[in-house]
Amino acid sequence: MIQRTSLIAALVLAAAAGLPAATAQSPQAQAPQLVSGLPDFTLLVDQVGPAVVNVEAGSARPGNAGPDQQDIPEFFRRFFGPGMPLPPGMPQPQEPGGRRGVSMGTGFIMSADGYVLTNHHVVAGSNEVKVRLSDRREFTAKVVGSDEQSDVALLKLDASGLPALRIGNSQTLKPGQWVVAIGSPFGLDHSVTAGIVSAVGRANPYANQRYVPFIQTDVAINRGNSGGPLLNTRGEVVGINSQIFSNSGGYMGVSFAIPIDVAMNAVQQLKTTGRVRRGQLGVQLQAITAEDARGLGLPDTRGALVNLVMDGGPAQKAGVQRGDVIRGFNGTSVDVWSQLPPLVGALAPGSKVTLTVLRDGRTLQVPLVLSQLDESQAQAPSSTPSAPGPRGAAGSNALGLVGEDIDAATRTRLGLKAGEGVAITRVEGMAARQAGIQPGDVVLAVGRTPVGSAVALDRQLREVRAGQTVMLLVRRGDATQYVAVTPRIDGSR
């Protein structure tokens, strides 16, 4: 009775105070459950583990040095002490005199007859490759072929009836999906880590692999994980672990994997010919910023901006021009420039394709036939400023650029056509300096209009108004790029 009286009194006091009574409050509708517990990977690891292998590539060349004591993780340096032998499987220091270097990595068996996939950088430069299975059997592997651009290497073991992994479909991956990596970080065989897909179709600006749309994950990857499988929750391979982004040399939460679709494209060619052939358009591309879009009169920043068309290439033959924006490739939308190279590189030379091009406000469909990629063109262009020997008279313009004519000999040395380009000797305008224009740069065009003399450059820039964005096509070293420059509205240059 006392308890009931106390409860009634409490309700009366709550009502008097204007507070809602708990018994009278309607429950708030709950949000739907979007995540249903954490996965258990034990069954997956038990089934796929036997097909994950350790790869050891040795080289007798002095330049391919193995890891020294400074490369050993701090834990092992403290635990074992300097000069102590490392545990079995750990990378061993190089012998005195550089007689042998060892590269340690991971791989996985993709077929029962002994084909193994790993990274190109694991076996590059080696003269002997050893593969150790989970049951401790060891084989000397033959390198069937290796491709630097995709960072894929195909090995062959003289064996049969081996456990093999199922190949999945990396195109179905979405950010947020669970993925698992199995590998040999620091030589620790069959280490398992898990995480989620952070992004797909990622261009890695720190790797010279423009033909790979990387899978970015937060799975812990370290040295020795290279070449190991990235698996979905069905135990299917969706990627090959390849790189990490790190300021320290260790895992920092950003890992990159090669999509298995890209890898298998390379594998088929390596099996057939021992090398990988890719198609090319014969253009150089760049991203489009908001300032670029204003300067070019574009409706938005979608697409890949063409800043160089190679002589005699497919794009030139089809009529593609500098300043064009490629927005589609064979019906696939191109929203950022980095999406285009993987689409092109996945096709064989001789393939017929159609580009969707935006030019002067008009959308054009441009058919062309891909040529074979010159591997030298696949390397990242140099950004080292050139030092031309210009001659001629300086002028003045709205951007404060002082240009001089380039003589024939210097043009030839720089790979320029006759009457092409103006050498910049001085940058007086603040806006141009802030945009990155430097003495030694060569201006090839203002917008779509080529310039071949200091007088022509001044003429094109003389009418530029404050606040108006102008696009300069600039050559620096071997690199060519459009640069947006916007003079200040206050009238200063």
Image (cartoon, grey):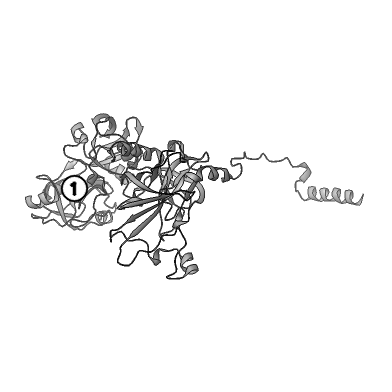
Residue 101: image location, x then y, percent: 33, 59
Q: Nearer the viewer, residue 338 or 474?
A: 338
Identity, as a three-letter code, of the amino acid under mark 1? Leu
Q: Nearer the viewer, residue 346 or 254?
A: 346
- Relative placement, left or right, of 194 versus 410 is right
Looking at the image, can residue 218 be seen?
no
Residue at 31% x, 37% y is: 269
Q: Nearer the viewer, residue 455 or 292?
A: 292
So how many labels did they put on this image? 1
Residue 214: image location, x then y, percent: 39, 44
* Helix, strand or loop for disc 1: helix
Q: Is residue 169 above or below residue 55?
A: above
Residue 303: image location, x then y, percent: 32, 38
Which residue is denoted by mark 1 in the rendering? 461
Q: Quadrant of the C terminus?
A: bottom left
Residue 406: image location, x then y, percent: 10, 52
Q: Is residue 360 above or below residue 88?
A: above
